[in-house]
Amino acid sequence: MTAKKGHRVSFVKSLQAAWHKADSLLCVGLDPDPARLPAGLAQRPDAIFAFCREIIDATAAYVCAFKPQIAYFAAARAEDQLEALIDHIHRHHAGIPVILDAKRGDIGATAEQYAREAFERYGADAVTVNPYMGFDSIEPYLGWGDRGVFLLCRTSNPGGSDLQALQVGNERLFEHVARLAAGSWNRNGQLGLVVGATFPDELARVRTLVGDMPLLVPGIGAQGGDIDASVRAGGRAMVVNSSRAILYASGGDDFAAAAGAAARQTRDALRAALARL
């Protein structure tokens, strides 16, 4: 497939620049639950956009990326607010990549449409993709050579072990995915992997298999992943996501300030863990 033309710096270079500029591994996940929005916003027609915009503006100084979860917007019929939110990040916080958490997984022309949705409609800098239908479910995304693609590898949920830990020859399935992602699948150097903070031993194993490939690491904060263990296992080339612990640090009118404080605290904890390496 011929790479589609773009006018952006490649995702990996953008991410490296964001790591350096913010001196941060923190990614703030944007999972806006209408039932948890502050009372002062709840009745607004653009409540989700307004809530997330204030979170973004309060936390932008402490992050290397933002990660909106598309299901929270789609379920609330707020896809237009998601488009506006990503545009807000690009306009007002230029240089901070946006990873659209969509976990798409399909083949051929359908995968092409999912890629268009992520990269053309929403303007995301990267997207999460389920690789378990094989390379032809990933290849259409590689047509956007300046964007990133994070493949699910060892996810943070307990049920991930049902499949990802199965033996495939002499290795586990998630190890096989990691080898493919670091090898023949990574044609343009665009790929990264999703590996949960809740499984630090597996995170360390993936790191040994893929070198300095970017790892998107969910699971700290509300899911209980340990920052020190994650940093020891994954090193510096990580995008460490925290969602609920930051978004809902306060349910009152001070929600944005509380989110900013929680983001700063998490950023500082990640920095301290890196310093102890």
Image: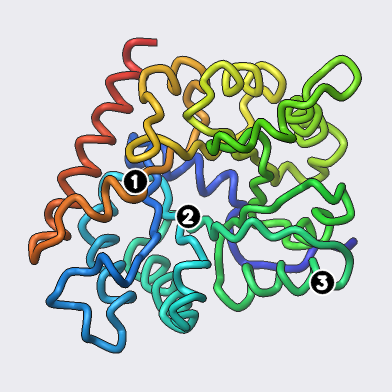
Q: Earlier in the sequence, mark 2 or mark 1?
A: 1
Badge 3 crowding class, 10 Å Cα cut-off, few under 14, some 14 to 19, many 20 or more, is few
Tell me the kind of residue under disc 3.
Thr
Residue 183: percent from left, percent from top: 82, 32
Residue at (69, 53) in percent of width and height: 129
Query: Of all residues shown, which one is farthest toward the top?
Result: 277
Residue at (33, 37) in percent of width and height: 221
Residue 199: percent from left, percent from top: 53, 24
Residue identifier under label 1: 63
Q: Earlier in the sequence, mark 2 or mark 3?
A: 2
Rendering quarter of residue 173? top right
Residue identifier under label 2: 97
Looking at the image, is mark 1 or mark 3 nearer the viewer?
3
Residue at (46, 43) in percent of width and height: 17
Task: Determine whether label 2 and label 3 are within 8 Å by CB.
Answer: no
Q: Earlier in the sequence, mark 1 or mark 3?
A: 1
Residue identifier under label 3: 110
Colouring style: rainbow
Task: Determine whether label 1 and label 3 are within 8 Å by CB.
Answer: no
How many numbered badges does the structure rendering display? 3
